Amino acid sequence: MGRTIENLGIDQLAAFSTIEVELTQPEMAVSVIIPDPERFSQNSFGAEALLSFNGGIQFFRAVFLFFLGIWPLLLTAAFTWFAYRKWFPRLKASMHNKPQA
C-alpha cells in the first residue's frame, strides 16, 4: 500500500511538469536524387541482340561438343543401321524360303 502512495505522489509531481520542445529546420534544404534502378537495368536493343547472338553461338558450341564426345556411339549406331539394312532382307527371305516339315 505504501508503494501505491509513492507512485501517486510521483504522478502528481509529473502532472505539473513542463516540457519544452523546440523544433528547428536547417536553413539549406538537402535534396537527394534517387535513380530508378529498373531504367538503368534495361539493356538497349543492340546489347540484347548481341547477348542473344552470343547465346546462340554458345548453344551451337555446346551441341557440337556433345556430339564430338559421343562419336563412338554414333559410329556404332550408323554401322548397325547399315548392317541391318543390308543383311536383314536376306535373313527375312531365307526364313520364308525354309521348307516346312
Image (tube, grey):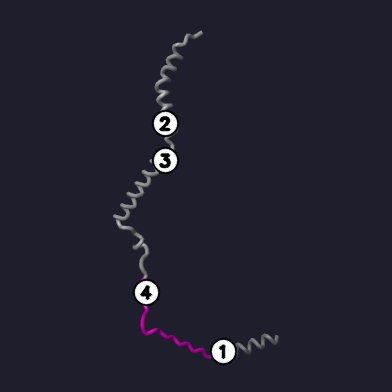
The 10 Å Cα crowd at callout 1, few under 14, some 14 to 19, many 20 or more, is few
Which residue: 60% across, 90% down? 12
Which residue: 56% across, 91% down? 16
What residue is pinned by disc 3?
A: 66
The 10 Å Cα crowd at callout 3, few under 14, some 14 to 19, many 20 or more, is few
Q: Amino acid at mark 2?
A: Leu
Q: CA distance from mark 2 to mark 4?
A: 68 Å
The reply, left or right, for residue 78 in relation to residue 14 is left
Q: Main secondary structure of the magenta part?
A: loop
| Circle 4 or circle 1, nearest the eye | 4
| Circle 1 or circle 3, nearest the eye | 3
| Circle 2 or circle 4, nearest the eye | 2
Q: Residue furthest right?
A: 1
The reply to whether the C-beta atoms of the residues labelled 1 and 2 are less than 8 Å apart is: no
Q: CA distance from mark 1 to mark 2?
A: 98 Å
The reply to whether the C-beta atoms of the residues labelled 1 and 3 are less than 8 Å apart is: no
Q: Amino acid at mark 4?
A: Val
What residue is pinned by disc 2?
A: 75
94 is higher (above) or lower (below) than 71: above
Instruction: Write down the quadrant of residue 75 in the picture.
Output: top left
Residue at disc 2, secondary structure: helix
